Amino acid sequence: MNFSTLYKVFDTVVSVLDAKKEETKKDESRERTTSSAYPPPTTSFADQVEARLTNVVVAALKEAFDRDHARLELEREHLEEQRRRAEETMRLELQREAIDREIGRLRLLAAAGLVGWIASVVLLVTRGQQVAVSSAVLIAACALLLGSVGCAFSAQANAGASVRESDALPKSTAGTASLWLLLAGLALAAGSLLF
């Protein structure tokens, strides 16, 4: 039920009744002035009770409307708080997913670097001391691939620590270095096969 509409209707009815009472009082005052032989009319007990009851009803309605307004404001604040919490939860979930993707990428780089390092070591052992240049290039490739694995692990640790410190996932220089070291190491390992 809409209390504001009910209040407006009640207020209109009371206003009409008050206007009607004022008209009757004006008519009575005119009659008194025209004939002073009649004594002034006294307000009856029923009129006094009606006026008091009207005041009580109006006060009760105003109190009910004030309570309803306060309840609506409380509900509005509660909904706003729920919306803010949902947005914060969504932001944290998106951040967590971004970090998971970054950590997955770094793990892939570490695995690729480790496989490349193992392949370079196997090539170094199997080829022996055939060509000194080829061995030096394979040793450099092994060092670059180990550096790639180390940078990938370091970037993973930094990604986890950055979550606790800030809202956004910062760009990791160790992750970028890991990728470039991996590419350089694999290129040197492949180039050593040419010698």
Image (cartoon, rainbow, N blue to C red):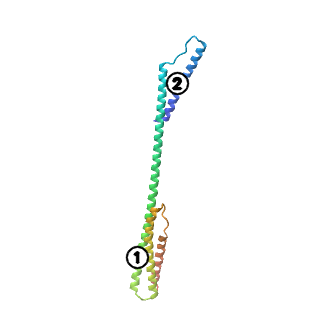
Q: Is residue 11 visible?
A: yes
The mark nearer the N terminus, 1 or 2, is 2
Toward the right, the furthest residue is 34
- Label 2 SS: helix
Type of amino acid at the residue the image marks with label 1: Val
Q: In the rendering, at what x and y percent does residue 134 appear?
A: 45, 85
Q: In the rendering, at what x and y percent does residue 13 appear?
A: 51, 27
Q: In the rendering, at what x and y percent does residue 161 appear?
A: 44, 65
In the image: residue 51, left or right of residue 125: right
**How much space separates mark 1 and mark 2, taking CA atoms?**
95 Å
Quarter of the image with the N terminus in it:
top left
Which of the 4 quarters of the picture holds residue 16? top right
Q: In the rendering, at what x and y percent does residue 106 appear?
A: 44, 69
* Residue ID for mark 1: 115
Vertical placement of 194 versus 110: above or below?
below
Type of amino acid at the residue the image marks with label 2: Leu
Q: Which mark is residue 155?
A: none
- Label 1 SS: helix
Vertical placement of 17 versus 85: above or below?
above
Q: Is residue 101 visible?
A: no
Vertical placement of 112 versus 17: above or below?
below
Q: Which mark is residue 17?
A: 2
Residues 4 and 157: in front is: 157
